[in-house]
């Protein structure tokens, strides 16, 4: 798909593609491209090489470079295998192979189809005859025996499925002839890349499938079944087995001397007459009669309420395939490209999911004068926004709507910062404006919403407070005195004083008398400077010394008129 009409590309589909663009279009700084859709089986690498030239007058081509990209990987092919639950040697046994493209893109290319049957205890069976493959795989030639490995071209659209019905006959002889009773087997098929070797089809049934075939993923499938080998009784000495399973002489002969012989009936031999055949069973609605006379329901049906009914849900009638259609895995008829118009698949222009949008080279866009309304999922006409938003702080976005700036919200008629949904005070809730408030009838006390306390009267005495009952009382340790709450007065005994809330004794410290110094009782007279200075020479005169020494006067007794005696000492 080129990005413009200037490109000229070769036809597709093709294994290689070449595109040219005029050099005049590639001006400096120009970038052009074209999209290429490829499909491959498994991993692949797609490379593109660019060049320019030749210029007029020469034949030189200059290489620009090469770039590669890898794609593919896990196969989009899914294989499913179903079939009969029980098979018998020598009898037809049918299997169904469904090949589906689970990828988003069509698949077209060669694949290797491998098919084989394995039996428990015997490994892979060789030479299993294929009686029919409907429809054929497309191999050249088609396989006729199992195990089989052939290469076929497979073409599947996205989600398309093909089914192949394979019928085989297990050999009666060989290794299966020695089997007794019932054994397990499985039929495995793989749809793989052409260069993949297909090994044994279930050599050891007890092993994991990936052990023998590698990690094939969903492109490898097996169907388990059982093989029932019935051993027929054989008669000796010319005897034959009748319908009751007994060995008897053929009709017209008798058993004599260890063998069946004709003629004579008097030799003492005993002729074993065949038992009468068992009565024929009565066919119920939908039943068929087998070769041994049994009445059974056809394969895929069960006997219920006296008639044969399908064991699964009845299939709806298949749709009619029109030109260009295929039947997908759900049985629907779909066009490989485009849509069904008037009974023919036609490629229609892409439709836009947005109402009113138009397809362009860059995808679906709204026409000029319109814009995308994401809520309506449609293109709506542009409108001229009003000059200013009505809510303070809002502005208009690209769609013309008034919105608050980031991390803000409409609250109290303006754009305000978004507050936390959790209020800081316990019990508060946010109102319509986003503010935290206590519920009706409650108020904030402390750090929580509480019911309001009843109103209390004002105490008239200074210092009083309300107790729990609402009464006015003085604080503990005080009493009403002089119109206020005061501490009680304490009277202490004589010789004690009220100190620090208790009466404490007072000890009087005795002091030294006046004229002495020191701490009682160690008192010493205070030494004074003499007022009279005496010449030492005068002291030698006894008369002078006598005058200086004070004389002690005799005590006088004064009589008090009241009769008391007063003693007066004069130093």
Image: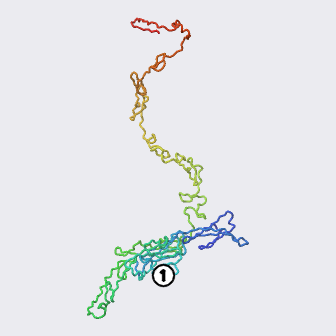
Look at the image and tell me whether residue 493 can be seen.
yes
Q: Nearer the viewer, residue 543 or 167?
A: 543
Q: What kind of element bears circle 1?
A: loop
Identify which residue, 402 or 507, lies in the foreground.
Answer: 507
Residue occupying the point 39% across, 23% down: 492
Q: Residue furthest bottom?
A: 263
Give coordinates of residue 35: x percent, y percent.
60, 67
> Which quadrant of the view contains residue 71?
bottom right
How many discs mark residues in the rendered view? 1
Q: Position of residue 436 (x, y in %)?
A: 48, 44
Quick one: which residue is furthest to the right in this view? 57
Please identify the quadrant where the N terminus is shown.
Answer: bottom right
Q: Residues within 10 Å of mark 1 (few under 14, many from 20)?
A: some
Q: Position of residue 410 (x, y in %)?
A: 53, 48
| Lateral position of residue 179 relative to residue 195, left or right | left
Out of 211 and 196, give the one closest to the viewer: 211
Q: Please name whichever residue, 106 or 522, is drawn nearer the observer in this view of the structure.
A: 522
x, y percent for residue 331: 47, 72
Q: Is residue 191 left or right of residue 478?
A: right
Residue 328 in view here = no
Q: Residue tagged by mark 1?
A: 144
Up the image or down, 183 lies above or below 250; here it is above
The colour scheme used here is: rainbow
């Amino acid at each position: 798909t080129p990005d413009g009409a200037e490109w000229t590309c070769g036809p597709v589909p093709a294994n290689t593609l070449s595109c040219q663009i005029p050099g005049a279009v590639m001006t400096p700084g120009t970038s052009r491209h074209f999209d290429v859709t490829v499909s491959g089986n498994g991993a692949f690498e797609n490379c593109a090489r660019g060049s320019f030239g030749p210029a007029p007058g020469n034949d030189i081509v200059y290489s620009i470079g090469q770039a590669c990209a890898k794609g593919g990987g896990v196969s989009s092919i899914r294989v499913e295998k179903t079939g009969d639950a029980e098979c018998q040697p020598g009898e037809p046994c049918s299997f169904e192979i469904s090949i589906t493209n689970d990828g988003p893109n069509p698949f077209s290319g060669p694949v290797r189809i491998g098919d084989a049957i394995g039996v428990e205890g015997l490994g892979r069976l060789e030479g299993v005859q294929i009686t029919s493959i409907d429809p054929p795989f497309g191999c050249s030639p088609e396989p006729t025996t199992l195990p089989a490995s052939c290469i076929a071209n497979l073409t599947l659209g996205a989600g398309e499925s093909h089914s192949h019905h394979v019928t085989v006959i297990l050999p009666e002889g060989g290794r299966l002839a020695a089997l007794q009773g019932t054994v397990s087997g499985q039929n495995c098929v793989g749809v793989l890349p052409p260069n993949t070797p297909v090994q044994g089809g279930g050599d050891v049934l007890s092993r994991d499938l990936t052990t023998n075939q590698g990690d094939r993923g969903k492109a490898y499938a097996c169907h388990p079944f059982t093989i029932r080998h019935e051993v027929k009784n054989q008669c000796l000495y010319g005897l034959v087995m009748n319908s009751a399973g007994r060995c008897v002489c053929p009709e017209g002969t008798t058993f004599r001397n260890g063998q069946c012989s004709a003629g004579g009936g008097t030799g003492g031999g005993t002729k074993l007459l065949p038992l009468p055949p068992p009565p024929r069973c009565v066919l119920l609605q939908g039943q068929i009669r087998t070769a041994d006379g049994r009445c059974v329901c056809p394969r895929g049906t069960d006997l219920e309420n006296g008639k044969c009914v399908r064991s699964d849900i009845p299939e709806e009638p298949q749709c009619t395939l029109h030109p260009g259609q295929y039947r997908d895995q759900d049985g629907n008829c779909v066009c490989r490209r485009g849509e069904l118009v008037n009974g023919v698949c036609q490629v229609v222009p892409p439709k836009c999911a947005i109402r009113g949008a138009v397809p362009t080279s860059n995808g679906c866009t709204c026409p000029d004068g319109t814009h995308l309304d994401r809520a309506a999922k449609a293109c709506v006409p542009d409108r001229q926004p009003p000059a200013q938003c009505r809510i303070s702080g809002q502005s208009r976005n690209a769609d013309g709507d008034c919105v608050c700036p980031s991390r803000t919200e409409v609250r109290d008629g303006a754009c305000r910062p978004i507050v936390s949904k959790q209020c800081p005070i316990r019990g508060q809730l946010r109102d319509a404006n986003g503010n935290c408030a206590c519920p009706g009838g409650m108020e904030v006390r402390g750090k929580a919403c509480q019911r309001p306390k009843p109103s209390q009267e004002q105490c008239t005495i200074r210092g009083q407070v309300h107790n729990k009952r609402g009464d006015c009382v003085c604080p503990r340790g005080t009493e009403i005195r002089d119109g206020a709450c005061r501490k009680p007065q304490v009277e202490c005994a004589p010789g004690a004083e009220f100190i620090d809330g208790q009466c404490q004794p007072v000890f009087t410290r005795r002091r030294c008398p006046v004229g002495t110094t020191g701490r009682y009782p160690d008192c010493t007279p205070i030494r004074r400077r003499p007022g009279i200075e005496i010449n030492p020479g005068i002291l030698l005169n006894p008369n002078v010394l006598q005058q200086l020494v004070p004389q002690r006067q005799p005590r006088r007794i004064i009589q008090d008129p009241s009769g008391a005696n007063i003693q007066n000492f004069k130093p």
